[in-house]
Amino acid sequence: MDYFLYKKGKLYCDGLAVEKIVKDFSTPLYVYSSRTILEHFVKIKKAFAKLKPLICYSVKANSNLSIMKLMVENGAGLDIVSGGELFRAKKIKCKPEKIVYASVGKTDQEIKQAILYGILMFNVESLAELNRINSVAKSLRKKVTVALRFNPDVEANTHSYITTGKKENKFGMDSESVSWAFLNKSSFPNLSICGIHIHIGSQITEGAPFVSAVKKTKQLITSLRANKSEINYLNIGGGLGIVYNDEKPQTAKEFADLILPLLEDLKVRLILEPGRFIVGNAGILVTSVTYIKEALTKRFVIVDAAMNDLARPSLYGAYHKILPLNKSLGTLENNEKKTDIVGPVCESGDFLGKDRQLSVKQGENISVFGAGAYGFSMSSNYNSRLRVAEVLVKNRKAYLIRKRENYSDLVRNEVII
Ligand code: LLP
């Protein structure tokens, strides 16, 4: 699944000793494997080769410019959700015709910038937004392509915070609104409404929810076409789950084998928006043990990374595997006290792992696995902590792709009055 492998008890990334990388760049540190990233991209590409889809890497998963560039250089498009992500896409010179733009709250300014760059299409989430894009397009004297995001009301069996395709979620439109928009497309003269978009959630490990969503979407497309609407694009979003612990997520091939037969007779250009599947297992967060604290019922391993660096455990109760960088230093004993791996942030919710068996010593380095997606991209400066450095390993060389922040960075935009 990835190229973070132990050899003689020591962790390597793409064949490079992580210990050596840490020596050069210190901790806390995100380390990414370009081999793992590319291999996952190829897995999806191959699985769906029959339909030659446009694969738009979902930038929110990991928006580092070098990682975006790696994807784009290898043929991916981008799925963006903000003016900031558009700015990043422009910076790495992603072709506009490979960019799709979702989000329930696009502002006039964001819409304008995206139109001027000439993106492939907007994925529109409400009738109000449809109106807004039409009027911005009119003011620019442009005709703009849009897909409507359909909320198929399916259960994705994932964490409730990252379920997006249920009718009570804020995303997408019901079938009546979608049909209304297509039937009244003449009210939107500056739009070419010609696609359907769905995205039902993230970290979905089984195929059934996707199948059910695609089937519902197919029915909708059939009924729209019966009413003479033209549908040229179908975007089935992202959401493929990965292994964090002992999950058995469907493979890209299994996923494609379920979905492709449903799409064969549909005659649409297919778009995919994978994020986590591509970068999730391609990153680790390396952190160093500051103290060991023996409490009455537990042992706390206090490390130099925290919830502001990797929010997923605190926010979703997410499990990330945590192992020492150098396995030969520690030993696991069965009767060991349960260990929580915690950061220095002043909240009891600040943990990276709970009730683990991890035997490490002060000063040792440990890695938090599966941190490539929604790791750095969700990090913050909470507790005035500096955001950490990021390193990408490519062709057995470690490249610094984001410098560690310093205290001046921290207060750069603040004004003392
Ligand atoms: N397309 C759309 C419209 C999305 O909203 C998302 C993710 C994706 C694609 C990519 O989904 P993926 O393939 O990565 O599952 N912070 C959460 C995940 C939030 C996902 C948001 N949308 C986490 O750490 O689990």
Image (tube, rainbow, N blue to C red):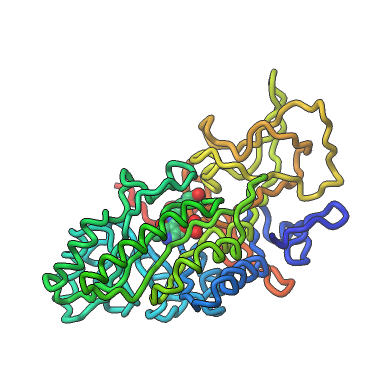
Extreme residue in the top direction: 296
Q: For residue 406, say whether it is visible.
A: no
Q: Residue at x 44, y 78 (%)?
A: 94
Depth check: 227 or 143 in front?
227
Residue 392 point in image, percent of width and height: 64, 66
Residue 328 point in image, percent of width and height: 86, 46
Q: Residue at x 59, y 63 (%)?
A: 252
Depth check: 282 or 184 in front?
184
Q: Residue at x 48, y 72 (%)?
A: 55
Q: Is residue 45 above or below residue 251?
A: below
* In the image: residue 316, left or right of residue 327: left
Extreme residue in the left direction: 187
Q: Is residue 47 above or below residue 335?
A: below
Residue 27 point in image, percent of width and height: 66, 52
Q: Quadrant of the N terminus?
A: bottom right
* In the image: residue 254, left or right of residue 236: right
Depth check: 345 or 103 in front?
103
* In the image: residue 222, left or right of residue 52: left
Q: Quadrant of residue 318?
A: top right
Q: Quadrant of residue 212?
A: bottom left
Q: Is residue 95 above or below residue 185?
A: below
Q: Is residue 319 above or below residue 390?
A: above
Residue 189 point in image, percent of width and height: 14, 76
**Number of on-image labels:** 0
Q: For residue 372, say whether it is visible.
A: yes
